[in-house]
Image (tube, rainbow, N blue to C red):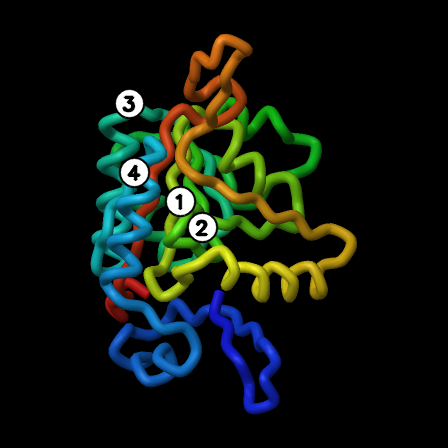
Amino acid sequence: MEYGLDSAGNWQYHEPDWSVTRGETDNRKKAVCPMDEATVSQFKEKYESLAGVVHVVDGIAEAAETVLSILREAGSKCIALGELPDAVTEAVAERCAAEGMQLVGPRYRSADLPGAIDAAQAGVAGAAFGIAETGTIVEFATNDAIRLVSSLPLIHVAVLRAADLVETLMEAAAPIRDFYERNPEDGGVTFISGPSRTADIEMRLTLGVHGPAASYVVVLRELDRSTA
């Protein structure tokens, strides 16, 4: 997700290009969606204050290794894949298969839902963008499978480009509005800030009752062409 003001002062939305390196897009990023280490650090600090875990990596290969490490440590045997760039999907799938993990998705038949995803111990999906000040990842969905991958399994792993981080909640309004304008009938937006929380009348907080008990975000600082 990339966006910025055009010469007329209107917000313009651009699909991200995962196939190029960070260096090749530095000038465009400065004009469209500036990113700095302070924003990444703020997002990591806030997300982890909400019981989530953030890993900051350099490139798709390191991202895939990090995802695999998370799944391995959790003892996950069945993994549901959501919408991810092809290169990320291939890298994660290759490593998971080598570990003997069963993969479902990222294409799902309606007749197989929600069972196919409910059987998975972990879900791995991409995030449209993140909000640093609130420690939030934002998910855009136009079908139930996308939402189920991040909400049904006990473990949720999101992949987010550092360049897709915005600093404030106010900045999130423009891309969300644009998404709904392009998908007026089937669009859905989900804000995720750490694992699922449920509290009773006695104010006892429990994680994972109505959603994932563990939530991880793998933030990519840059992409490497060798694995794109």
- Residue hosting label 1: 158
3D distance between C-alphas at marks 4 and 2: 18 Å
- Residue hosting label 3: 75
Q: Looking at numbered disc 4 in the image, what kind of residue is underneath it?
A: Glu
| Of marks 4 and 2, the one in the foreground | 4
Residue at figure coordinates x 30%, y 36% from the top left: 49
- Residue hosting label 2: 126
| Secondary structure under the numbered disc 2 in the rendered image | strand
The quarter holding residue 205 reads: top left
- Residue hosting label 4: 48
Residue at figure coordinates x 50%, y 63% from the top left: 171
Residue at figure coordinates x 36%, y 28% from the top left: 214
Residue 34 in the image: x percent, y percent?
A: 35, 73
The quarter holding residue 124 reads: top left
Q: Observer-nearest residue: 203 or 4?
A: 203
Residue 145 in the image: x percent, y percent?
A: 60, 40
| Secondary structure under the numbered disc 4 in the rendered image | helix
Please say if the residues under marks 1 and 2 sit with CB atoms less than 8 Å apart.
Answer: yes
Q: Decide: is 150 above or below 136.
A: above
Counting every numbered tag in the picture gives: 4
Q: Which of marks 1 and 2 is nearer the N terminus?
A: 2
Q: Earlier in the sequence, mark 4 or mark 1?
A: 4
Residue 224 in the image: x percent, y percent?
A: 25, 67
Q: Observer-nearest residue: 31 or 211?
A: 31
Query: Badge 3, how many Cα within 10 Å: few under 14, some, many 20+?
Result: few
Q: Looking at numbered disc 1 in the image, what kind of residue is underneath it?
A: Ala
Q: Looking at numbered disc 3 in the image, what kind of residue is underneath it?
A: Gly
Q: Earlier in the sequence, mark 2 or mark 3?
A: 3
